[in-house]
Image (tube, helix red, strand yellow):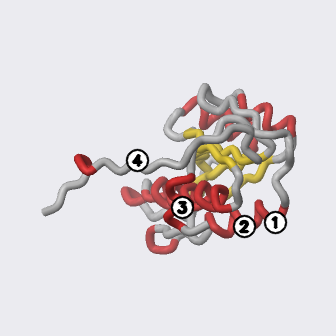
């Protein structure tokens, strides 16, 4: 698919077939994620790839937004020990968000469905995901990306709104 097609085809998929995502596709998604930009090239991201059904079930209950039944979840975490220092440290959120968007677009390119479920800044959800994955205090879960072979079809769309654009 060409990029302009991928951009329109990328949709939030909430229903998945019970079919695993291949190791090759997972590798492609992770390479895409780490191709994203990061402030001063600090690459403060870490990715937890979950296919274990018990762990997936626990993640489904981690927040009110994460109750999705997919064969694969990638939890994108910021590692604060690699983030910029002091007041610049919150740039990890932008860095990990860029990596997340790359995963979503790469999944669409592979004809997989995906869904970004935000975790940060929900403190209770952050705590639950951290416990499930045994994260350190320096690791902050930004989101859970659910991925799989879609069991629903959503039409491509263009969400461009000229009123949101301001030329100076």
Which residue corresponds to mark 2? Answer: 28
- Mark 2 vs mark 4: in front: 4
Labels 2, 3: front one: 3
View extreme (bottom): residue: 41
Sequence order check, earlier mark of 2 and 3 = 3
| Among the 4 quarters of the image, the one containing residue 103 | bottom right
Residue extending furthest left? 168
Given contact means CB atoms under 8 Å apart, are the residues at marks 1 and 3 in contact? Answer: no
Give the distance between the C-alpha atoms of the residues marked 3 and 4, in whole angstroms. 13 Å
At horizontal 48% and vertical 53% (from top left) the residue drawn is 93
N-terminal-most mark, 3 or 4: 3
Q: Residue 5 carries which label?
A: 3
Residue 24 is labelled as 1
**Circles 2, 3 touching at the beta carbon (< 8 Å):** no
Label 2: how many Cα within 10 Å (few below 14, some 14–19, many 20+): some
Q: Are dots 1 and 2 in contact, CB under 8 Å? A: yes
The relative height of residue 2 versus residue 118 in the rendered view (above or below) is below
User: Badge 1, how many Cα within 10 Å: few under 14, some, many 20+?
Assistant: few
Secondary structure under badge 3?
Answer: helix
Q: Please name whichever residue, 165 or 45, is drawn nearer the observer in this view of the structure.
A: 165
Q: Which residue is drawn at 50% across and 61% down?
A: 95
> If you read the primary sequence from the N terminus, does the residue marked by circle 1 or circle 3 appear first?
3
Q: Distance between the residues labelled 1 and 2?
A: 6 Å
Disc 1 or 4, which lies upstream in sequence? 1
Q: Name the residue under label 4.
A: 159
Element carrying mark 4: loop
């Amino acid at each position: 698919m060409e990029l302009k097609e991928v951009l329109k085809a990328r949709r939030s998929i909430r229903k998945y077939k019970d079919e695993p995502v291949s190791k090759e596709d997972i590798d492609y998604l992770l390479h895409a994620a780490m191709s994203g930009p990061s402030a001063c090239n600090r690459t403060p991201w870490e990715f937890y790839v979950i296919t274990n059904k018990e762990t997936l079930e626990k993640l489904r209950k981690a927040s009110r937004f994460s109750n999705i039944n997919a064969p694969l979840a990638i939890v994108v975490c910021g590692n604060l020990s690699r983030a910029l220092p002091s007041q610049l440290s919150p740039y990890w959120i932008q860095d990990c968000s860029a990596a997340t968007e790359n995963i979503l677009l790469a999944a669409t390119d592979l004809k997989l469905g995906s869904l970004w479920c935000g975790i940060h800044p929900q403190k209770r959800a952050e705590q639950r995901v951290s416990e499930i994955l045994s994260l350190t205090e320096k690791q902050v879960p930004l989101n859970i990306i659910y991925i799989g072979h879609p069991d629903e079809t959503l039409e491509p769309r263009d969400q461009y709104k000229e009123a949101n654009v301001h030329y100076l």
